[in-house]
């Protein structure tokens, strides 16, 4: 009997250490919408571990399960996709990674169906009106209400050529008009409808096009490339300014020489 008690104590101490112990502190769903209403979805599950040992245990579990979504769901049912279904994932788009430094598990995927549907009645030759398809957030339906958990946020990043009005988005969401409009649904809300509508401009004026060209350049290039282009532009402008008198004289001489009145 005296030998059994120490053994039980040892088992009591070791069992928690071998178990997977962690908490999901935050869940983010970032959806990048393209010009046709399709979306790339990135879900991140930010984790908290009681100690370094549990973190290493989770890393081993990741190395074991890799990108098998079914096995992750069996390991912990919270690790699943929340937009669409597994059968709707576009082939070759699924990827699961674990970030050791920031301690989050990331599930990245795209769906074969568009997340935004075209409203042909409100569209014109210059623009297309898109609306959020009802099935996109069905995972959050509880009865007749959409319920977003407190630790979950959902963001929709729209194309640069899109514009969105406050009246076209339900009150619980926020809108940020940066290089690309971003609609964010915070956690801890419950509502019977989630309305998202925006206009995608297919034909824009030349000056408007230039503005979007600048936006795309700033967004899709790194700072080093931007610096090189800016320096090249400054050199070109400086050279033109330095040679302005010489160029002006040559242009004036050319006009006089080729003018019928000269």
Image (cartoon, rainbow, N blue to C red):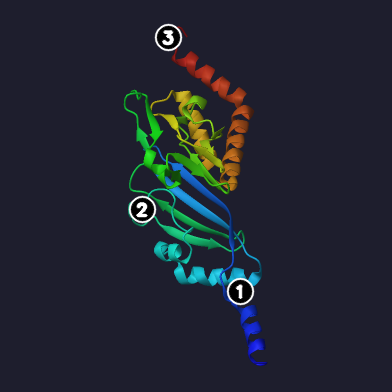
Dot 3: element: loop
Percent across and percent down for residue 129 are 38, 28
Dot 2: element: loop
Q: Is residue 180 visible?
A: no
Precedes in sequence: disc 1 or disc 3: 1
Q: Is residue 57 above or below residue 107?
A: below
Residue at image location 61% in from the left, 23% down from the top: 245
User: Label 2 belongs to which residue?
Assistant: 89
Disc 2 residue crowd, few under 14, some 14–19, many 20+, Cα 10 Å:
some
Percent across and percent down for residue 236 are 58, 34
User: Label 3 belongs to which residue?
Assistant: 260
Instruction: Name the mark nearer the viewer: 1 or 3.
Output: 1
Disc 3 residue crowd, few under 14, some 14–19, many 20+, Cα 10 Å:
few
Distance Cα–Cα, label 2 vs label 1? 36 Å
Q: Is residue 16 above or below residue 161?
A: below
Distance Cα–Cα, label 1 vs label 3? 98 Å
Residue at image location 61% in from the left, 36% down from the top: 235
Instruction: Name the mark nearer the viewer: 2 or 3.
Output: 2
Disc 1 residue crowd, few under 14, some 14–19, many 20+, Cα 10 Å:
few
User: Label 1 belongs to which residue?
Assistant: 16
Distance Cα–Cα, label 2 vs label 3? 71 Å
Please identify the quadrant where the N terminus is shown: bottom right
Q: Residue lying furthest top in this view?
A: 261
């Amino acid at each position: 009997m005296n030998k059994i008690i120490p053994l039980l104590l040892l088992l009591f101490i070791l069992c928690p250490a071998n178990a997977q112990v962690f908490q999901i502190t935050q869940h983010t769903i970032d959806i990048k919408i393209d010009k046709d209403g399709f979306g790339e979805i990135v879900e991140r599950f930010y984790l908290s571990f009681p100690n370094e040992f549990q973190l290493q245990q989770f890393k081993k579990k990741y190395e074991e399960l890799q990108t098998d979504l079914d096995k992750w769901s069996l390991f912990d049912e919270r690790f699943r996709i929340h937009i669409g279904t597994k059968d709707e994932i576009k082939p070759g788009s699924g990827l699961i990674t674990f970030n050791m430094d920031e301690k989050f598990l990331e599930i990245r995927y795209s769906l074969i169906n568009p997340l935004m549907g075209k409203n042909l009645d409100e569209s014109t030759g210059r623009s297309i009106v898109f609306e959020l398809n009802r099935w996109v957030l069905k995972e959050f339906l509880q009865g007749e209400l959409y319920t977003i958990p407190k630790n979950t946020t959902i963001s929709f990043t729209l194309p640069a050529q899109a514009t969105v009005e406050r009246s076209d988005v339900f009150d619980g969401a926020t809108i940020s008009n940066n290089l690309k409009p971003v609609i964010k649904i915070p956690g801890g809300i419950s509502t019977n409808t989630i309305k998202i509508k925006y206009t995608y401009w297919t034909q824009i004026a030349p000056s408007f096009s230039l503005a979007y060209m600048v936006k795309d350049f700033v967004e899709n290039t790194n700072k080093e490339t931007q610096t090189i282009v800016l320096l090249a532009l400054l050199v070109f402008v400086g050279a033109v300014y330095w040679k302005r008198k010489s160029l002006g004289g040559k242009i004036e001489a050319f006009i006089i020489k080729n003018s019928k009145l000269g």
